[in-house]
Amino acid sequence: MEPYVKQEIQNGIATIEFFHLEQNSLPSYLLSELAATITNAGINDDVKVIILKSGGDRTFCAGASLKELIAINDAQTGEEFFSGFANVINAMRKCPKFIIGRLQGKAVGGGVGIAAATDYCLATQHAAIKLSELKIGIGPFVVSPAISRKMGVSALSQITIDADRFFDAQWAKEKGLYANVFESIKVLDEAILALATSLCSYNPEAMQETKKMFWRGTDDWDTLLAERATISGRLVLSDFTKETLKKFK
């Protein structure tokens, strides 16, 4: 199957889905499509609530495209590469509609950032999380504001420093990333549909104002995440990171 970002609107619910054969990793062009799709859903009067999901029944998102990461040879390209997830997170932050995250499986790196940027996230018991950036010599600079906002600095520190470890879904729930964890995708989808349907009966203006309240104090994120992308773009050119990435070729 070809990679895609697609949207379906039904009964006021916009379901946005992304897919890539490489464990739903997100190359730059898919990140751009995803950010635009979220933005457009936010201004569509037919949409009252958004469900964000990925295709397949295994990994939710393996993060950024490893092939693109390995190919970076200059600071500008590096900055543009890491800006991809920054743009998606900012699109989610600015979207006036509630975004429900649906995690059917593991999330790594940028995938954890996307989960953290949802307004309400539900997952299966298989949705373990991992931040592996520090291991390759970079660091989760772009996604860390979203993660620390949702889970706290202590949890962010744990998953950042223990970069080899997958933290299970129950741990992520205890730290605030997931609102609930379910045994199967079937039960997960039933819960998400029930929640989304219920939200569609609420006052759209009240939900919009509530979302503003949730995201208070993040007005500087356009600048902040751009600065973080610059840091990552510089570090990816370091000798340490280049040597580490050779192992993945």
Image (cartoon, rainbow, N blue to C red):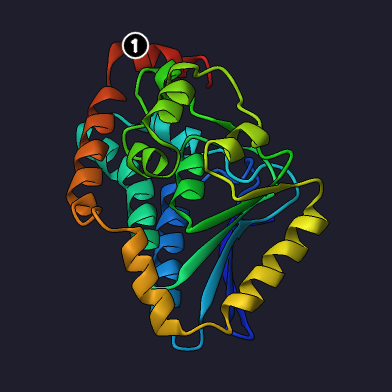
Q: Is residue 238 above or below residue 116?
A: above
Q: How many labels does the image show?
A: 1
Residue 168, position as x, y percentages in the image: 66, 30
Residue 179, position as x, y percentages in the image: 60, 50
Residue hosting label 1: 240
Residue 34, position as x, y percentages in the image: 46, 61
* Residue 94 seen in render: no
Residue 130, position as x, y percentages in the image: 55, 29
Q: In this view, does 47 lie above or below 2?
A: below
Q: Is residue 95 above or below residue 111?
A: below
Name the amino acid type tagged 1. Answer: Phe
Judged left or right of residue 92, residue 225 is: left
In which quadrant of the rendered image does the N terminus lie?
bottom right
Who is closer to the viewer here, 68 or 169? 169
Question: Residue sitting at 39 percent across and 31 percent down?
Answer: 71
Who is closer to the viewer here, 214 or 159? 214
Question: Residue sitting at 47 percent across and 47 percent down?
Answer: 116
* Residue 206 seen in render: yes
Judged left or right of residue 248, residue 194 is: right
Who is closer to the viewer here, 65 or 186? 186
Question: Residue sitting at 64 percent across and 38 percent down?
Answer: 106
Asked which quadrant contains residue 195, the reply is bottom right
Considering the numbered disc 1 on the image, is that residue within a helix, a strand or a loop? helix
Mark 1 crowd level (few <14, some 14–19, many ≥20, 10 Å Cα): few
Judged left or right of residue 203, residue 188 is: right
Judged left or right of residue 146, residue 61 is: right
